[in-house]
Image: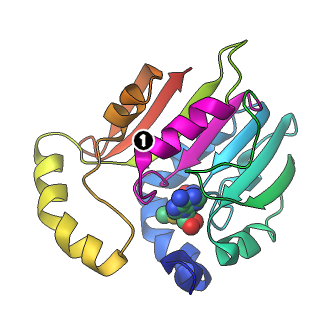
Amino acid sequence: MGTIFDRVSPVYDRGMQPLEWLIFRRLRERVFSSLNGDVLELGVGTGVNLPLYGPTARVTGCDISTEMLNWAARRATRAAVRLVQADAQDLPFDDDSFDVVAGSLVFCSVTDPLQGLAEARRVLRSHPRGQLVLLEHVRGDGLGALLTEVLHPFWHAWSQDCHLNRDTVKSVARAGFRVGRLERHALGVVQVIRATV
Ligand SMILES: C[S@@+](CC[C@H](N)C(=O)[O-])C[C@H]1O[C@@H](n2cnc3c(N)ncnc32)[C@H](O)[C@@H]1O
């Protein structure tokens, strides 16, 4: 049957262009170019972040959608990259396998974010402390929260998988991570979350 992302994969990058130009591009460039070592990128999608990694990153990109992964496989990248079809809620990797677990715009659509975050924690190394780095759209604060709550039912009915009103940083803390620096952008609706095991 496939996921909604299997079906949207041919138009995903084009559909994202306005938002990339408005906000995501510059955040992606800063966040993903700084990651090193053994990196697991969850929900790698069409691989938009793959060209941003430097040559010292060894990246495992996983996604539940085979069609999104087919697009990711076409990306040019300076890093060593392998792509794996996998559910973030049930990762096919050993405990203590990665220095960094990263993702962008992914915990909005993982069905059970706490289970996905528990898996991220399991596969991260504890010495030195593994890092979780997420660029996410979330519920936001104040006016941002009001807007996302109002829009969420319509957006969710159309998109099927994506939630506009998740409080991902709260889930990160609930999953047992130590939350570090939190960046809030666009009324807090876009956040860069950094945490350690
Ligand atoms: C909104 S797209 C983001 C793609 C890419 N990370 C980006 O920033 O453009 C969400 C991605 O997460 C993937 N995804 C959703 N649920 C997942 C899960 N449980 N496990 C792995 N990937 C998942 C989807 O297939 C899709 O490629």
The residues colored magenta run 97-123
- Amino acid beneath label 1: Leu
* Residue 4 is one of the magenta-drawn residues: no
Residue at the spot of label 1: 114
Q: Nearer the viewer, residue 81 or 112?
A: 112
Relative to residue 175, is residue 109 depicted above or below?
below
Q: Quadrant of the C terminus?
A: top right
List the single residue furthest toward the top: 127
Name the residue at 53% across, 76% down: 5
Q: Nearer the viewer, residue 151 or 127?
A: 127
Q: Quadrant of residue 102?
A: top right
Could you say where residue 15 lies in the image, as x and y percent from the top left? 48, 77
Q: Quadrant of the N terminus?
A: bottom right
Relative to residue 58, is residue 91 depicted above or below?
below
What number of labels is visible?
1
Q: In the shown orientation, is residue 129 left or right of residue 103?
A: right
